[in-house]
């Protein structure tokens, strides 16, 4: 499973990219607005840091507007793919963009049937939002598991991005479910590094080495 960062914060992207583990980035209008930056400038800077796929969201609600925005966003850098909302107008846009060779990420997916439609339209990625389903009392990871099983069953090339992840267990569960990608908030990525026993182990090794370093 590839690890993406779910943020528009360039400092966080630089830091995690420095770990050598970052395969891509997903953004959305809420994440960019949190940075208080213009969308295009922000995406241009991210594209200068990350060589893997970067998702940028189209905001029009009609097919023609989505396709126009997709052309504008895709012109920023060749690794930018276009987030298209899971609507009938969005499916039509995905289908047009797929024929043009522009990669898409169908976003706001909350069911296996929506993921089937996204794949049939030619989406490169489909993003089930796990945390938002958990928030309303439905187990979000069950939808990820269903989508992965269906895509596997029919050799569907669309890749599943487990999105809206809220804690490290979500990442483990997404990996066990067979998601191709997990897009992870910065704070969750940092939590994944740490383990109390690792910290205790390092401390003990350093203390023991102190006892013998002058021998
Ligand atoms: C994914 O592409 C979305 O940007 C993100 O995961 C949404 O997460 P949220 O539900 O925490 O806003």
Image (tube, rainbow, N blue to C red):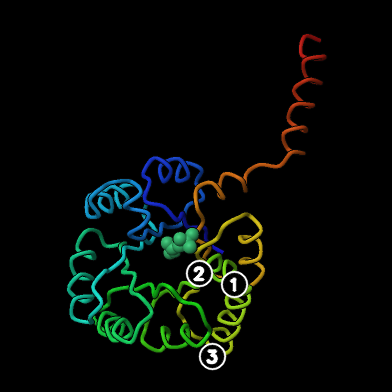
Left or right? Give the position of 29 relative to 141: left
Looking at mark 3, is its residue's CB closer than 8 Å to ligand 1?
A: no
Looking at the rendered image, the quarter that the C terminus falls into is top right
Question: At 25% from the left edge and 59% from the top edge, which residue is drawn?
Answer: 77
Give the mark nearer the N terminus: 3 vs 1.
Answer: 1
| Label 2, label 3: how far apart the Cα atoms are | 22 Å
Looking at the rendered image, the quarter that the N terminus falls into is bottom right
Question: At 55% from the left edge and 68% from the top edge, which residue is drawn?
Answer: 130
Of residues 62 and 76, the one nearer the viewer is 62
Looking at mark 2, is its residue's CB closer than 8 Å to ligand 1?
A: yes
Note whether 110 is above or below 34 in the view shown.
below
* Structural crowding at the residue carrying mark 3, measured as other residues with C-alpha within 10 Å and reported as few (<14), some (14–19) or many (≥20): few
| Label 3, label 1: how far apart the Cα atoms are | 22 Å
Question: At 40% from the left edge and 89% from the top edge, which residue is drawn?
Answer: 120
Which of label 3 and label 1 is nearer to you? 1
Q: Are marks 2 and 1 in contact (CB under 8 Å)?
A: yes
Question: How many marks do you count on the picture?
Answer: 3
Indicate the secondary structure of the residue bearing disc 2.
loop
Residue bearing the label numbered 1: 140
Give the mark nearer the N terminus: 2 vs 3.
Answer: 2
Residue 208 spot, x, y in % from top left:
81, 21
* Structural crowding at the residue carrying mark 1, measured as other residues with C-alpha within 10 Å and reported as few (<14), some (14–19) or many (≥20): many
Tell me which image quadrant ligand 1 sits in: bottom left
Indicate the secondary structure of the residue bearing disc 3.
loop
| Label 2, label 1: how far apart the Cα atoms are | 7 Å
Residue 210, numbered circle: none
Note whether 209 is above or below 71 in the view shown.
above
Of residues 70 and 157, the one nearer the viewer is 70
Left or right? Give the position of 193 relative to 210: left
Residue bearing the label numbered 3: 154
Residue bearing the label numbered 2: 129
Which of label 2 and label 3 is nearer to you? 2
């Amino acid at each position: 499973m590839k690890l993406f960062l779910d943020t528009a914060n360039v400092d966080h992207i630089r830091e995690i990219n420095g770990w050598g583990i970052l395969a891509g980035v997903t953004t959305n209008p809420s994440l960019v607005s949190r940075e208080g930056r213009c969308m295009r400038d922000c995406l241009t800077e991210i594209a200068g840091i990350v060589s893997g796929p970067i998702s940028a969201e189209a905001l029009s609600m009609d097919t023609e507007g989505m396709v126009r925005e997709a052309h504008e966003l895709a012109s920023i850098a060749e690794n930018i793919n276009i987030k298209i909302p899971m609507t009938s107008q969005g499916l039509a846009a995905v289908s047009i963009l797929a024929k043009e060779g522009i990669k898409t990420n169908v976003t706001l997916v909350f069911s296996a049937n929506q993921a089937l439609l996204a794949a049939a339209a030619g989406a490169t990625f489909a993003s089930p939002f796990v945390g938002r389903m958990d928030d309303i009392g439905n187990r979000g990871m069950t939808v990820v598991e269903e989508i992965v099983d269906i895509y596997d069953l029919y050799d569907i090339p669309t890749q599943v991005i487990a999105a809206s992840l809220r804690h490290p267990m979500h990442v483990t569960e997404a990996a066990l479910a067979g998601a191709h990608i997990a897009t992870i908030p910065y704070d969750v990525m940092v939590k994944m590094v740490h383990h109390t026993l690792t910290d205790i182990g390092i401390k003990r090794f350093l203390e023991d080495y102190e006892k013998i370093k002058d021998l």
